[in-house]
């Protein structure tokens, strides 16, 4: 059993979802969905990446990922090509426009978070700072496909 009781786990899940939705609502200047933003970010950060690895990281089935990357490619944010190590495999890379869009979104979300965090009482800011290692560990644990 976890160190949090069921009510605390529910609060954590709901609060994290509300934060994510609030960031989406107030910072998505483009027409990208949350999943498209995530895929684009992974490709920008990881560099050219195989579709199989990208599907695993993003937790998406290959068909859904193919549709998403097709839309991002049509928008000029990604390019797909054959993997030089295995011509049968497909990999994706960010375009200059994709990298710029990712950077724009990161900056916009950082400014939005900073504005709201700066408006909190200092003891809440200290609590958020103290919680960062635990949130990092939780995010890493949830990202692990096992």
Image: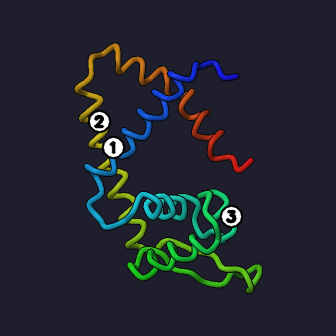
Q: Which residue is mark 2?
A: 114
Q: Is residue 79 above or below residue 55?
A: below
Question: Mark 2–mark 1 contact, CB under 8 Å?
Answer: yes
Q: Position of residue 144 (x, y in %)?
A: 68, 46
Q: Is residue 72 above or below residue 8?
A: below
Which residue lies at the image location 74% right of the left edge and 85% below the top edge?
88
Q: Secondary structure at mark 1?
A: helix
94 sits left or right of 55 in the view: left
Question: Mark 1–mark 3 contact, CB under 8 Å?
Answer: no
Q: Secondary structure at mark 3?
A: helix
Bin the neighbour count of mark 1 within 10 Å (Cα to Cα): few under 14, some 14-19, many 20 and up.
few
Pick the quarter of the image with the N terminus: top right
Q: Secondary structure at mark 2?
A: helix
Q: Position of residue 67 (x, y in %)?
A: 52, 76
Q: Nearer the viewer, residue 123 or 71?
A: 71
Residue 110, which numbered label? 1
Q: Which residue is mark 3?
A: 53
Distance Cα–Cα, label 2 vs label 1: 6 Å
11 sits left or right of 50 in the view: left
1 or 3: mark nearer the eye: 3
111 sits left or right of 72 in the view: left
Which residue lies at the image location 60% right of the left edge and 70% below the top edge?
48
Q: Nearer the viewer, residue 141 or 6?
A: 6
């Amino acid at each position: 059993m976890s160190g949090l009781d069921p009510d605390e786990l529910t609060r954590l899940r709901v609060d994290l979802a509300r934060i994510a939705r609030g960031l989406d609502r107030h910072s998505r200047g483009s027409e990208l969905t949350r999943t498209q933003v995530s895929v684009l970010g992974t490709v920008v950060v990881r560099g050219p990446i195989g579709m199989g690895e990208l599907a695993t990281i993003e937790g998406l089935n290959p068909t859904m990922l193919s549709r998403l990357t097709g839309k991002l490619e049509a928008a000029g944010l990604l390019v797909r090509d054959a993997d030089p190590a295995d011509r049968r495999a497909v990999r994706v890379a960010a375009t200059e426009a994709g990298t710029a869009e990712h950077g724009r979104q990161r900056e916009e979300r950082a400014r939005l978070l900073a504005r709201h965090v700066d408006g909190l009482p200092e003891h809440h800011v200290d609590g958020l700072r103290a919680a960062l290692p635990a949130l990092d560990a939780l995010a890493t644990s949830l990202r692990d496909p096992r």
